[in-house]
Image (cartoon, rainbow, N blue to C red):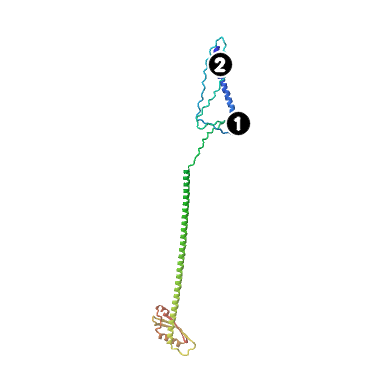
């Protein structure tokens, strides 16, 4: 009975030792994290370069040697328990890196940094060689665009100048037309004024001519009447008698009336007889002038 108890006790002690070692390892890791965490708060992070793996290889576990059951000890000899050695911690096997074209860089762990900043290894920048043909083509296209733009601006400028010149020419022609119209109006006005002056002169000349004609025939009528007066002799002074004579076309006398007596009846009667004896009285040949002689006033002086 005692043999079985000892055997069970010797079998459970390695597990307790393993548990104690794991607990100690966890405490050490926790203290390390606290120390590195505090130092990480005080110092700025430093960059590091690590190799990234798409998947980690599975760790190879060493086969655990099966423990053989302890042989039964003869009851004559006391069973001495063998000291149990602490289990060796499993050393993780570093996975073999994949073959790469470029040699992997060594990982430099940071001095004091709990959080590891992973940076992907920068890919080498490929040198881009410019395509000369594309550059030449692009340069030619830009020059063509610039030339086309300049040509378009020049055409617009020429079109604007042409339009301005046309408007200026139209304005000049309009001014010429206005000047010509004004000149025509002035010339027409001058002609009208000249014609008016000529007409007025003609009218004046005609009136003068008519007046001269009337005066001429009135003098002829008075001379004819005077030639037929039988003057009474020895009248004092120079008495004057006036008659109003109404004539008919052709010079015949329709009526004779005494307008103003001379104060001498003999002289008045002598003049009246001479008027009737002078018919037909001489009249101008223009019938338009007859109205000037229809009612004729005749004044006769005793002495001329």
Q: Which residue occupies the foreground of this view, 184 or 62?
A: 62
Where disc 1 sits, the SS reads helix
What residue lies at 46% left-to-right and 63% top-to-bottom?
176
The number of numbered badges drawn on the structure is: 2
Circle on res. 39: 1
Q: Which residue occupies the foreground of this view, 109 or 7?
A: 109
Looking at the image, residue 247 sits to the left or right of residue 117; the answer is: left
Instruction: Note whether 4 is above or below 135 in the view shown.
Output: above
**Crowdedness of circle 1 by 10 Å Cα count: few (<14), some, many (20+)?**
some
- Point out residue 208 in the picture as x, y percentages from the top left corner: 45, 78
Give the farthest residue toward the top.
76
- Point out residue 35 in the picture as x, y percentages from the top left corner: 60, 29
- Point out residue 125 in the picture as x, y percentages from the top left corner: 51, 37
Locate residue 219: give its quadrant. bottom left
| Distance in Å between CA atoms under marks 2 and 1 | 45 Å
Circle on res. 48: none
- Point out residue 39 in the picture as x, y percentages from the top left corner: 60, 31
What residue lies at 59% left-to-right and 27% top-to-bottom?
32
Where disc 2 sits, the SS reads helix
User: Going from the N terminus, do you reach mark 2 or mark 1 first?
Assistant: 2
Q: Quadrant of the N terminus?
A: top right
Q: Which residue occupies the foreground of this view, 28 or 106?
A: 106
Q: Which residue occupies the foreground of this view, 58 or 289?
A: 58
List the residue tagged with mark 2. Answer: 10
């Amino acid at each position: 009975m005692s043999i079985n108890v000892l055997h069970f006790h010797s079998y459970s002690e390695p597990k307790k030792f393993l548990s104690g070692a794991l607990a100690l390892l966890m405490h050490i890791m926790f203290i390390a994290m606290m120390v590195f965490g505090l130092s990480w708060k005080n110092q700025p992070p430093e960059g590091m370069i690590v190799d990234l793996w798409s998947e980690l290889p599975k760790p190879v576990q060493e086969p655990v040697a099966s423990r053989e059951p302890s042989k039964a000890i003869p009851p004559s000899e006391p069973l001495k328990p063998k000291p149990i050695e602490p289990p060796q911690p499993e050393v993780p096997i570093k996975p073999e890196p994949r073959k790469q074209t470029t040699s992997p860089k060594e990982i430099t762990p940071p001095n004091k940094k709990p959080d590891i900043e992973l940076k992907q290894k920068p890919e080498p920048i490929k040198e881009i060689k410019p395509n000369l043909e594309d550059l030449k083509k692009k340069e030619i296209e830009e020059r063509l665009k610039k030339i086309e733009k300049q040509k378009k601006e020049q055409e617009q400028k020429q079109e604007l100048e042409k339009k301005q010149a046309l408007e200026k020419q139209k304005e000049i022609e309009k001014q010429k037309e206005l000047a010509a119209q004004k000149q025509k109006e002035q010339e027409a006005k001058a002609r009208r004024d000249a014609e008016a002056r000529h007409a007025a002169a003609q009218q004046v000349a005609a009136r003068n001519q008519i007046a001269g004609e009337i005066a001429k025939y009135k003098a002829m009528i008075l001379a004819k009447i005077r030639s037929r007066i039988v003057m009474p002799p020895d009248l004092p002074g120079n008495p004057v008698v006036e008659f109003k004579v109404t004539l008919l076309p052709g010079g015949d006398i329709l009526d004779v009336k005494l307008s103003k007596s001379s104060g001498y009846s003999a002289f008045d009667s002598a003049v009246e007889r001479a008027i009737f004896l002078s018919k037909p009285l001489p009249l101008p040949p223009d019938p338009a002038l007859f109205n000037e002689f229809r009612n004729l006033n005749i004044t006769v002086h005793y002495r001329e």
